[in-house]
Amino acid sequence: MANEEKQRYSAEELKEFEAIIRVKLEDTNAELKYLREALNRKNDTGTDATSGNSKVMEDGADTAEKENLNQLAVRQQKFAKNLENALMRIKNGTYGVCIDSGKLISKERLRLVPHTQHSIEAKLKQK
């Protein structure tokens, strides 16, 4: 049976996708934890508060680095939420179905972008 004819992925296929998503979610949460810890360390001034004003140039670099870490954390948090939503779609039986066309998203695309809700054709039409 061709992908175009199928309406849903089988339970076995969904288990494969669920395993991929869980690994990615675990990695994402670990990276998010690291970023949050790094941000918390940046908030801890330690002895810097007593060092005077000799580090004015470094303060700008510290601020820029903190902003970059914060942006990375926000992106990771959004990615984790998208992965969690994909797990919910697996549970409710809508995973792997393009929200634009109603057709199955290719397995290859789902393996690379497991949280997607768009087939490659639908995604290209968006541009």
Image (cartoon, grey):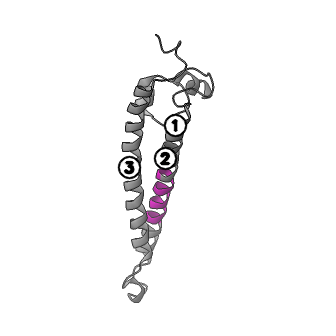
> What label sits on residue 91 in the rendered view?
1
Q: Is residue 78 above or below residue 42?
A: above
Label 2 neighbour load within 10 Å: few <14, some 14-19, many 20+: some
Q: Which structural element holds mark 3?
A: helix
Label 1 neighbour load within 10 Å: few <14, some 14-19, many 20+: few
Q: Which structural element holds mark 1?
A: helix
Q: Which residue is mark 2?
A: 79
Q: Is residue 17 above or below residue 51?
A: above
Q: Which structural element holds mark 2?
A: helix
- Badge nearest the viewer, 3 or 2: 3
Q: Tell me the magenta residue range.
A: 64-76
Magenta stretch contains residue 42: no
> What label sits on residue 26 in the rendered view?
3
Quadrant location, the C terminus = top right
- Badge nearest the viewer, 1 or 2: 1
Q: Earlier in the sequence, mark 3 or mark 1?
A: 3
Mark-to-mark CA distance, 1 and 2: 19 Å
- The front one of 37 and 96 is 96
- Badge nearest the viewer, 3 or 1: 1
Mark-to-mark CA distance, 3 and 2: 11 Å
Q: Please provide percent x and percent y for residue 2.
A: 47, 11
Q: Please provide percent x and percent y for residue 70.
A: 48, 61
